[in-house]
Image: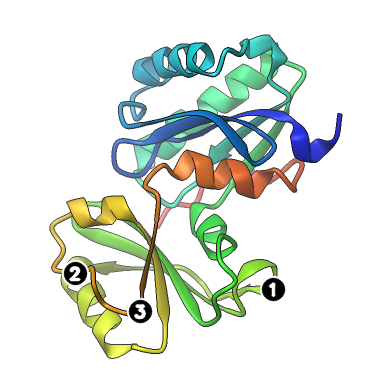
Amino acid sequence: MDPKKQLTIAFETSIGQGSIAVLRGKDVLASELGGVTRAEDLLSAIGSILKLSDSNLNTMEKIVVSVGPGSYTGIRIGIATALGLKRGLRADIVGVPVLEALAHSTATKNIASAVPIGRGRIAVQKNYGGGPSAKAKSAYVVDSDKFAAEIHANPDTNFILPREILDEDISLDSGSPNLRFVDSNLAVLIGRYAADRSGGNLEPIYL
């Protein structure tokens, strides 16, 4: 099997209400948004997404999980579930930093990836280059007011955000020319990012 066409289950459990997806390589077979941030809900969602994609857990060749940043509990739940699944499957497991996946989702240069991590805080990571050539600086956390001000103060920086960030209590002008939104289903994003990769560090990213 071509590694880029592996049957993959991906889940992101630390941002907002989380998301889950089944992919064949980078092609999405099924996806769901929300309701996967608790361990019992995630297990139920796994069963649901497998039915939607007409797949079987035993046929999964790759498990992809977000390693953060995001909520402390959500990160732990995602990684623990991925490790539990791997023990029962002959599947590769890939841990994906979600800010890195956001950066690699575009070829736009001079970008900053950003995700809400709860309690009015935003995790931000600036990259120069965009796409596979992106060179990342260290991620940092700002509160919502400072984040909105940072967007306005840096018109030459393209901020890459999941649409879910608009659900946060943040005063953002969604029409700002330097805002680039991606779908809120970050499981799809990390699943596609991992299609070209095998293995991966499962060390959680707590900010």
Q: Is residue 194 left or right of residue 69?
A: right
Tell me the kind of residue under disc 2.
Leu
Label 3 belongs to which residue? 178
Residue at x 60%, y 71% (from the top left corner): 107
Residue 89, relative to residue 37: is it above or below?
above
- Disc 2 to disc 3: CB gap under 8 Å: no
Q: Is residue 69 left or right of residue 82?
A: left
Sequence order check, earlier mark of 2 and 3: 2
Kindly identify which numbered label has been placed on residue 172.
2
Tell me the kind of residue under disc 3.
Asn
Q: Quadrant of residue 149?
A: bottom left
CA separation, marks 1 and 2? 29 Å
Tell which of 31 and 113 is nearer to you: 31
CA separation, marks 1 and 3? 20 Å
Q: Is residue 131 visible?
A: yes
Q: Nearer the viewer, mark 1 or mark 3?
A: 3
User: For numbered disc 3, what is the local secondary structure?
Assistant: loop
CA separation, marks 2 and 3? 11 Å
Label 1 belongs to which residue? 133
Residue 161, relative to residue 187: is it above or below?
below
Q: Which corner quadrant holds the N terminus?
A: top right
Sequence order check, earlier mark of 1 and 3: 1
Kindly identify which numbered label has been placed on residue 157.
none
Tell which of 72 and 194 is nearer to you: 194
Q: Is residue 203 left or right of residue 52?
A: right
Residue 12 % position (x, y): 45, 38
